[in-house]
Amino acid sequence: MSNEFKESIHRAVNNANLTGALGKFSEAYKVNRAKAYEGIDFEELRGRIAELKSYAASHLDQLSEQFARNAEARGAKVFRTSDPARVREYILKVARDNGVRSIVKSKSMATEEIHLNPYLEKAGISVGETDLGEWIIQLAGQTPSHMVMPAIHMTKEEVSDLFSKEIDERLTSDIPRLVKVARERLRPMFLQADMGISGGNIAVAETGSIVLMTNEGNARLVTSLPKIHVALVGIEKLVASYADIAPILKALPRSATAQLLTSYVSIITGPTPNPDGSLKDLHIILMDNRRSEMAADPKFKQALQCIRCASCLNVCPIFRLVGGHVFGKVYTGGIGTILTAWFDELKKSEDIQGLCIQCGACKYVCPGKIDIPELIMEIRRRLVKDQGLPLMQKAIYSVVNNRHLFHGMLRAASLAGKPFTSGRFVRHLPLFLADLTDGRSLPAIAGEPFRDRFKNIKQPKFKEKAAFYAGCLIDFAYPEMGESLVKVLNKAGIEVVFPQDQTCCGAPARYSGAYEVAAGNAIDNIKALLDEDVQYVVSACPTCTVALDHEFISTFESLGQSEWIPKARELAAKTVDFSTLVKSLVDQRRLSLKDGQKLGKITYHDSCHLKRTLKVSEQPRELLNRAGYELTEMFECDMCCGMGGSYSIKLPEISGPILKRKLHNIRETGAPLVAMDCPGCVMQIRGGLDQDGSAIRVQHTVELLAERLED
Amino acid sequence: MYEQFKARAEGVSAEVHRFDTRAATLEFIITFLKGEGLHDVPQSHALWADCPFLGGSVRQSLSEVAGLKFDVSQKLAAQAKFGISQMQWALADTGTLVQDSSAIDQRLVSSLPAIHIALVPTSGILADMPTLLTRIHPGASAYIAMITGPSRTADIERVLTIGVHGPERLIIVFCDELGGGN
């Protein structure tokens, strides 16, 4: 990670204005978005959008041609190019040929992508952004920090300073007054401009139409008043048919700003009369700039399903802390990371891809149904393939891939860590390791790992058997969780076996882009776990469960190692997370929890992988309810705790504030107890509460249920 | 569907009225204009784009109203306080008005003045966007315009503020008697 990048993160997380504004917005967004989608089947809607955009991405050439033909038949001039330089030259030529001196623009990310404004300004043409947010950042000499709300990082005081300078009059920070100033200042620019430049939200091949959506009304003026209109459209905006615009018009405003529809939608097909009676000179530029290459890439093709709503930014726990500028100058946030890797270059995404904590919140809300976290992982994988792993990580993974050495070192760590532990925690580490215990304590490595303790557990013999996949954290830090799991399953008549050859699930390697290492882990685990004759493979760690259930397969697929895929599928079919298994056992009356208990208030934290990948959220809640706890939901119960495996080690400056927010939300419920299904989250949250000196107990659901079994 | 439209449109700060006859509609508009300070001086006049409502002798009957103009130009529109036009459809589920705006006059009066008065035949209310897309097609309409509430922004500190580049008030007036082009 470059120093410059680290500094930009440091500046961002310490900018109270920025984190305050983004934090408030993201909280309100979640509520408003849900309201905007009331009564709408979001899954059905996004299924349709994904389908029609995916179709378009498979037929970019054909649709571009059809669009050009239809638009030209209506009198528009269409210019198709893959090269940003030629786009700039084309626009300048049109301007020069027509003696254009001033241009008004409505918001267009494509023009940001090709850095059009400085190019035209250098040629002596005045370019005015008219979207209020864009105008603000133009005056400030900055770049947009958000695709939909470019100036979200600025305060009204900063805006009033800028405007005061612009109109040479001291303004207060009264927002309606500031908006009025913008209206009055920009109005003459609209009336005098020789050319209007817009983007396009949708381009319809069937009719040669472009669709523009705005709230301020600037696009209507930009496309109506000047005699020349140039629309710059990325070819990913193409759709095949006119009817295709309905689902996009339904989802885009709801996902972008939680509106049912933007104030203005214009569907423009060919030139229309100008105010002086002449006919508009309409130019539409279809720009490729690597989009076709993206479409030809089996992994990244789906990124073209993006409708640029920026909801992936709005729900991102990282984005709301650091804002857009840490991501770069054009496209920001989750999808921005992917677009930057393509439209700019892979190398440019090297630092920013590391910002993703893989919580999956964006995938959950994406109206284009894009698996953004998966694509960011793919970027990571390709970067590692191109450039190799950093030396330190390479050394770590060579250890992780050797189970005996790895487990030997963990055992040694239990002794080495002794001087720093107090009770169950490591509270402070010396020197450069101090960052790890900044804001949270770490669990002490258990004196005796679960794999050793297991040998001493006396179990009744049952015909039905489950293999327990412990994962490193339960094995070496929280063996008591494993013991609780055995107790619960025994009660339901299931015997637990523990294959000793199981090893790390490979998630840490995979999330660092080291897929070869992850594949090695996967093979070791498949061998160990399929060797047993069991009905289930159960895990009490959602990250491990996801590895066994999904990621072994996708790792092999990414690497083209197809020979292991059938075995990986066999393992996946047996894999189940603890709460899902226990819930079904309770439903089948094979397991009873003590009746009529009044255990008081509890709150529940949803772990990212459990809720969003495994889609499990009700099961643990119902079990805890049935045990006699009174569930009080915390605010943002399914927001990431900031752990993210090694993320908290690589980016403690980001992980820390995310944890802080989580702890605050837990405390606000007033519950003395918080439950969760992931040992990683337990580590993060328990460590954070310990450092705060809080008395709130943090437990894995498995431990709480083991206490409540009927005798 | 009218009630649904009204609720949605008011939800985005539009003002919605309904009258049964042309006469009552006209009376409301004239009373409204005068109440809001209609005068025959720049920044106070009204500009009414040609539309079916003005057919028959209506336009002639209005020639005596001082400050009410019908010859649309960019200059007059930029100086007008009020713009009046007739929209063809209204979408009940989003509170949206729709018009074939290929004629520039229709866009000038609905985008430059501070107050836009939109006349709509009540029969033009449609359920939703997919229904609309079967009624109006780019093949025949070069500029399809949809308007949902007044111009708005939230670009400064996410505070919703009405009236940036377009009208700061949208007055929607339904007229039952006004058939309409659908």
Image (cartoon, coloured by chain):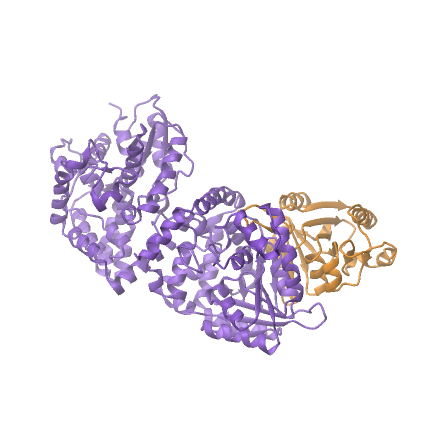
Residue closest to the eye, A323 or B98: A323
Chain identifier matching the orange colour in the rendered picture: B
Q: Nearer the viewer, residue A131 or A526?
A: A131
Is B151 placed above or below A276 here? above
Height in image: A92 above or below A111? below
- Residue A240 percent location from the top left of the image: 52, 65
Q: Is B156 situated above or below A135?
A: above
Q: Is residue A563 left or right of residue B74?
A: left
Residue A661 shows in the view: yes
Q: Residue at x 51, y 53 (%)?
A: A151
**Viewed as shown, does residue A661 lie left or right of A210?**
left
Q: Is residue A471 left or right of residue A35?
A: left
Point out residue A284 in the picture as x, y percentages from the top left corner.
56, 71
The chain letter of the purple chain reads A
Q: Position of residue B100 (x, y in %)?
A: 68, 61
- Does residue A585 appear anywhere in the picture? no
Q: Residue at x 15, y 52 (%)?
A: A399
Front residue of A614 and A428: A428
Q: Quadrant of residue A643?
A: top left
**A89, B4: nearer the viewer:** A89
Q: Is residue A425 above or below residue A214?
A: above
| For residue B56, side relative to residue A14 (left or right) | right
> On the image, which quarter does residue A291 sit in?
bottom left
Q: Position of residue A524 (x, y in %)?
A: 17, 51
